[in-house]
Amino acid sequence: MTSQPDAATATSTAFDLRGRRAVVTGVSAGIGSAIAIALAAAGANVAGIYKTDPEGAERTEAESRSFGVDTVFLAGDTGDVSQVDRLAELAVDRFGGIDIWVNNAARLLVKPMLETTDEDWHGLLAANLHGYFYGCRAAGRAMVAAGAGGRIINVSSAADILVVADLSAYVAAKGAIVAMTKVLALELGEHGITVNGIAPGMTVTPGMNTAIFNDEKLREERAQLIVLKRAGYPQDIANMAVFLASDAASYCTGATYYVDGGWMLTHPPV
């Protein structure tokens, strides 16, 4: 049996990510940007990928580097397996390995199912589901080969439980990510690799603001339905990511953590 570490020492170092090698997808804005910066603030070197908003990616990279860590970002599409594999290779070449991989890149499609075209469906799943599979596989292969364990974190959404109309493809992808997280946790546990998910509730991001809650009054009305009486912010999600990436979460795997301000307490799943 593994010996239990000294409590004081374990607590003081549990969230320290110095020397860890992290990969984050979708780093130009919102949750992905906040996660990349938070991991860097905790001491991790960070590789990232973004599809749009190069200026936003530059800001994320500059803020991450301000913590004295190494960073490398590239433009690409996580729906393209060759580009995800290129990201993994870049991280290994630059940092010497991968300890943490966060799948976050996604986009919204707000459209009734009966109006959703084949192109809409497949285009949405390319980034929102296929990209997560490619990322999990690339990360898992690199971590297993290194033999030192690791952390895989999948950002999904509370929308797979608290369903919203006109988001059929988006919700389908998010539900599949929750299921894939459980299966991969079973497969990689023997290698010391944990696999967990983060499901944000109503979170103020550029995508949410423009696609769903583009009216400030509507956002405030919806926020009053949440136990904590506010929407979440990217930093709330980033804090959970740092926890799951750290030694503090070494005994957590196969779960999806809902960071929703207690929303499901007032709107529980049926």
Image (spheres, rainbow, N blue to C red):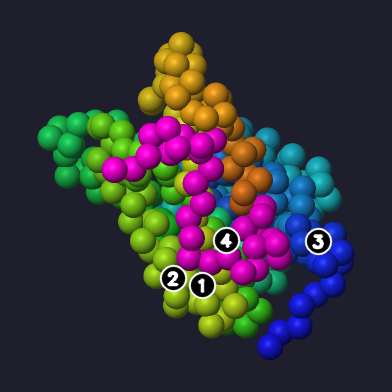
Q: Residues within 10 Å of mark 4 (few under 14, many from 20)?
A: many
**What kind of element bears circle 3?**
helix
Q: Which of the two labelled residues, at mark 4 and mark 1, occupies the earlier sequence position?
A: 4
Q: Position of residue 121 (x, y in %)?
A: 23, 45
Asked if residue 2 is positioned above or below residue 194 in the image, the reply reads below
**What kind of element bears circle 4?**
strand
Q: Position of residue 93 (x, y in %)?
A: 65, 69
Q: Are marks 1 and 3 in contact (CB under 8 Å)?
A: no
Residue 246 in the magenta stretch? The answer is: yes
Kind of residue indicated by mark 1: Gly
Q: Are marks 4 and 2 in contact (CB under 8 Å)?
A: no
Q: Which residues are magenta?
A: 242-270
Q: Which quadrant holds the C terminus?
A: top left
Residue at image coords 70%, 46%: 38
Which residue has dot 2 on it? 184
Q: Are marks 4 and 1 in contact (CB under 8 Å)?
A: no
Residue at image coords 45%, 16%: 221
Pick the residue in front: 3 or 194. Answer: 3
Q: Which of the two labelled residues, at mark 3 and mark 4, occupies the earlier sequence position?
A: 3
Kind of residue indicated by mark 4: Trp
Q: Position of residue 114 (x, y in %)?
A: 12, 35
Single out the mark in the foreground, 4 or 2: 2
Kind of residue indicated by mark 2: Leu
Specify the quadrant of the image occupied by residue 22: bottom right
Specify the quadrant of the image occupied by residue 115: top left
Which residue has dot 4 on it? 101
Measure the C-alpha gap from mark 2 to mark 1: 9 Å
Specify the quadrant of the image occupied by residue 134: bottom left
| Left or right of residue 6, residue 125 in this image | left
